[in-house]
Image (cartoon, rainbow, N blue to C red):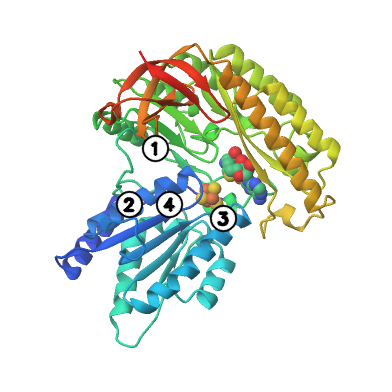
């Protein structure tokens, strides 16, 4: 089926804002609270900011306490079974509260809700959920919420609202309540066309579609004006930004455009697919002083046989060559990755190829996952020769190696001076956290008033997960 990029009309976006105002008026004055619980990746974090933006326009304040919340929104992730089990566990646990407070509204949305099978299961077995909608429905959350309120208003009628469509729109002009004041997400595209054989994302997020670069640059500019200092461009595969949008910049061009915005801020991005990471991108990263020298380049496996079965579109050797080129072109590059262990058909030899390649590349941090079959993906029906114990054993060995790599790379930073952005406060001895240009976590001592400031720090210590430093 051919995909045609479609934009949400300004009138439709305006209508949703009007619905928010109407709901606010109907609910009237008085305090009401919402809680938005987010699972999964940064893309979901970013979507939750839109959910909060809408809820704020309806007059809701936010709470972290489930008991206190009049509305609980669970924004879900379907990428591994474990994430889904957690969602079901937590949603199930809301039933007791709902028995005491039948007026509490429970919403389940996001990637899980895009799957017809999961919606069916929620309808049948999770009666606590009042409203369930898929990822493509996010822009019309107010309309669906209004419908839910109406259903609630009918005495004796405990009807529920379930909606999802495959029609994905590029939506501009939606309200957004951002999480912090220092770091901001900036979604540049949505969906994925890669269909890695293990991955559910293309099914729940739809085909890849990019926002226009003028819209993205305008949003980046307003973030800088509002004082944000760390902007992360988000997409499932940012390297293919602009594909299918006539006359649009590619990702390297987009980086240059955002880099040209006045101000002292950093640009990060997630995630790069190795098959589309080019010399042009590395050159742009090297030449743009605001672009962080960090590449999150998911390897998944170091075995060519497994990479082919995963439909990743690169070999171990071409991946290694790219990281070498990137290291050569981008001074101080920080490399991080994702690895899947126990993919169907992975042998001990395949695993050793992965282990060796990760050690050759040398990663600052590795996100390691045990393969989780996702219903509807090709790999879900493939035989897995390895036993659970073998897979766990491989996972443990990989994690041990990942931790040793990270600790050694961090140790080598000791004595250096880095420029960091202070972006969080902590309890305990190290009261502040910050990030280096490459994205390394640096714990510091200092006053909370330094939050949002840049600082020069001397690195005095390190462990597997972080660096420790002193402000100079
Ligand atoms: N678009 C990004 C990442 C998407 S999901 C990319 O292509 O890199 C984040 C990570 O979850 C993936 O990189 C992969 O390592 C892991 N993952 C995805 N599907 C998985 C599955 N079925 N089982 C285990 N890990 C999975
Ligand atoms: Fe999933 Fe592959 Fe797309 Fe990443 S590139 S979201 S792993 S299908
Ligand atoms: Fe999960 Fe959806 Fe992100 S499946 S990883 S929340 S795109």
The outermost residue toward the left is: 29
Q: Residue at x 47, y 69 (%)?
A: 93
Q: CA distance from mark 1 to mark 3?
A: 24 Å
Q: Which of label 1 and label 3 is nearer to you?
A: 3
Q: CA distance from mark 2 to mark 4?
A: 9 Å
Mark 3 or mark 1, which is nearer the start of the sequence?
Answer: 3
Q: Is residue 206 visible?
A: no
Residue 119, how many percent across, how many down? 53, 69
* Left or right relative to 265: residue 84: right
Q: Are the residues flagged by discs 2 and 4 in contact, CB closer than 8 Å? A: no
Residue tagged by mark 3? 83
What's the mark number on residue 186?
Answer: 1
Q: CA distance from mark 2 to mark 1?
A: 20 Å
Q: Is residue 279 above or below residue 344?
A: above
Residue tagged by mark 2? 9
Q: Which of label 4 and label 3 is nearer to you?
A: 3
């Amino acid at each position: 089926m051919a995909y045609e990029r479609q934009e949400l009309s300004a009138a439709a976006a305006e209508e949703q804002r009007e619905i928010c105002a109407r709901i606010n008026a109907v609910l009237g004055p008085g305090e009401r609270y919402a809680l938005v619980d987010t699972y999964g990746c940064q893309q979901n974090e970013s979507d939750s900011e839109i959910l909060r933006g809408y809820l704020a326009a309806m007059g809701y304040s936010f709470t972290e306490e489930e008991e206190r919340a009049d509305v609980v929104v669970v924004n879900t992730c379907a990428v591994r079974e474990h994430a889904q089990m957690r969602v079901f566990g937590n949603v199930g646990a809301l039933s007791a509260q709902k028995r005491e407070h039948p007026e509490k509204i429970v919403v389940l949305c996001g990637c899980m809700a895009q799957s017809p099978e999961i919606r069916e299961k929620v309808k049948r077995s999770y009666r606590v959920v009042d409203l369930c909608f898929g990822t493509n429905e996010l822009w019309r959350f107010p309309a669906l919420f209004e419908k839910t309120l109406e259903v609630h208003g009918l005495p004796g009628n405990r009807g529920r609202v379930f909606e999802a469509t495959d029609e994905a729109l590029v939506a501009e002009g939606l309200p957004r309540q951002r999480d912090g004041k220092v770091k901001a997400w900036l979604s540049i595209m949505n969906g994925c066309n890669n269909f890695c054989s293990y991955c559910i994302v293309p099914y729940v997020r739809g085909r890849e579609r990019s926002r226009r670069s003028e819209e993205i640059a305008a949003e980046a500019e307003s973030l800088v004006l509002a004082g944000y200092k760390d902007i992360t461009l988000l997409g499932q595969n940012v390297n293919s930004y602009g594909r299918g949008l006539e006359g649009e910049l590619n990702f390297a061009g987009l980086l240059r455009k955002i880099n040209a915005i006045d101000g002292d801020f950093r640009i990060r991005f997630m995630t790069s697919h190795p098959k589309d990471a080019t010399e042009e991108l590395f050159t742009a990263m090297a030449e743009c002083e605001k672009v962080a020298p960090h590449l999150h380049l998911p390897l998944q496996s170091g075995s060519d046989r497994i990479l082919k079965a995963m439909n990743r579109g690169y070999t171990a050797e071409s991946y290694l060559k790219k990281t070498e080129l990137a290291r050569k072109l981008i001074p101080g590059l920080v490399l991080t990755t994702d690895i899947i262990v126990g993919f169907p058909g992975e042998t001990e030899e395949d695993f050793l190829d992965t282990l060796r390649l990760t050690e050759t590349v040398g990663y600052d941090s590795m996100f390691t996952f045990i393969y989780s079959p996702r219903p509807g993906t090709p790999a879900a029906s493939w035989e897995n020769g390895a036993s659970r114990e073998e897979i766990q054993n491989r996972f443990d060995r990989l994690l041990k190696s990942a931790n040793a790599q990270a600790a050694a790379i961090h140790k080598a930073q000791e004595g250096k001076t880095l420029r960091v952005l202070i972006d969080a406060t902590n309890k305990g001895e190290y009261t502040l956290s910050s990030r280096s240009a490459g994205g390394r976590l640096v714990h510091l001592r200092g006053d909370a008033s330094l939050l949002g400031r840049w600082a020069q720090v001397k690195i005095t210590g390190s462990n597997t997960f972080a660096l420790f430093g002193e402000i100079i």
